[in-house]
Amino acid sequence: MWHGPYERPTAHYDEQLKEIDEELCVLINKRKELSKNPGFPTDELIYEWVNQYAFQAEFLHALFRCLLEEEHYQPIIEPKGFIKNIPVLKSFEKDDVFFLVTFLRQFENATVVNVTMDRDSSGDLPGEFMHHPFLELEIIDESGTKYTVQNNGGGGSGGHTALAYVVSPTLPEDLGNIQLVFKKESTYFNKDDDGLEFSVKLGH
């Protein structure tokens, strides 16, 4: 996501709210630590809180959507200083979709993980658009190193889709401890949870 310069919506701040606002930050952080996949509150819960705390439903929807999409507000990682390409060519297949991790592009400050998805599109109607699964990527490093992953978008046509993920910091030269875990991302287009998840162990 592109981030422009931020401007405060108002210069005023009631200092009496400082402790309460800090407590809100503490609770949000505690929420993140408690669950890595919080999902979205049910309609029943939303309207229970609307009635109990006199909020508007639209406000609570916007609030929890912001919490769900926090990673979209992270600073954009721009890969710089190309080093080399590393072939991977490891695959996974579910139903009629073939997933392939093709290669890594190593940069001085990041690694770009390239993935393709292919399915048989011979039965598609002319002009028909089929949503592909939105995948999120997690990097597991046995050495304990933590990585930030950003979906760099993708594209395709017919039954072919290509995706790219920017990983920071750069993955190590020895990839033997690195595992790529792909899961179906929680988005509007991925409401159906079919348990899609697969992992790819790098190295030999």
Image (cartoon, rainbow, N blue to C red):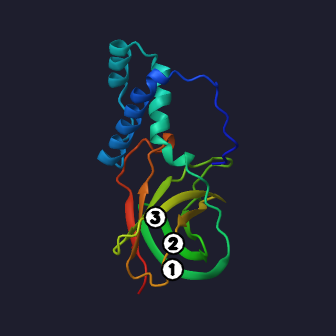
Residue at the outermost bottom position: 204
- Specify the amino acid type for callout 2: Val
Mark yes or no: residue 117 visible. Answer: no
- Specify the amino acid type for callout 1: Val
Mark linked to residue 49: none
- Confirm or deny contact between disc 1 and disc 2 (CB under 8 A): yes
Residue situated in front as seen by the camera: 157 or 69: 69
Image spot of residue 165 (x, y percent): 56, 63
Q: Which circle's residue, 2 or 3, is located before the other in the chain?
A: 2
Quarter holding the C terminus is bottom left
Q: In this view, does 33 lie above or below 180?
A: above
Mark linked to residue 147: 3
Image spot of residue 122 (x, y percent): 59, 59
Q: Which circle's residue, 1 or 2, is located before the other in the chain?
A: 1
Q: Which circle's residue, 3 or 1, is located before the other in the chain?
A: 1
Q: Marks 1 and 2, how far apart in space?
A: 6 Å
Q: Which residue is at a point 35% across and 12% down the rendered structure image?
A: 51
Mark yes or no: residue 129 visible. Answer: yes
Mark linked to residue 101: 2
Q: Marks 3 and 1, how far apart in space?
A: 19 Å
Residue situated in front as seen by the camera: 94 or 74: 74
The residue beneath circle 1 is 88
Residue situated in front as seen by the camera: 89 or 167: 167
Residue situated in front as seen by the camera: 163 or 91: 163
Q: In this view, does 92 lie above or below 62?
A: below
Q: Is residue 119 above or below residue 68?
A: below
Corner quadrant of residue 155? bottom right
Q: In this view, does 102 lie to the left or right of 140?
A: right
Q: Which residue is at a point 41% across and 65% down the rendered structure image?
A: 146
Corner quadrant of residue 140? bottom left
Image spot of residue 90 (x, y percent): 46, 77
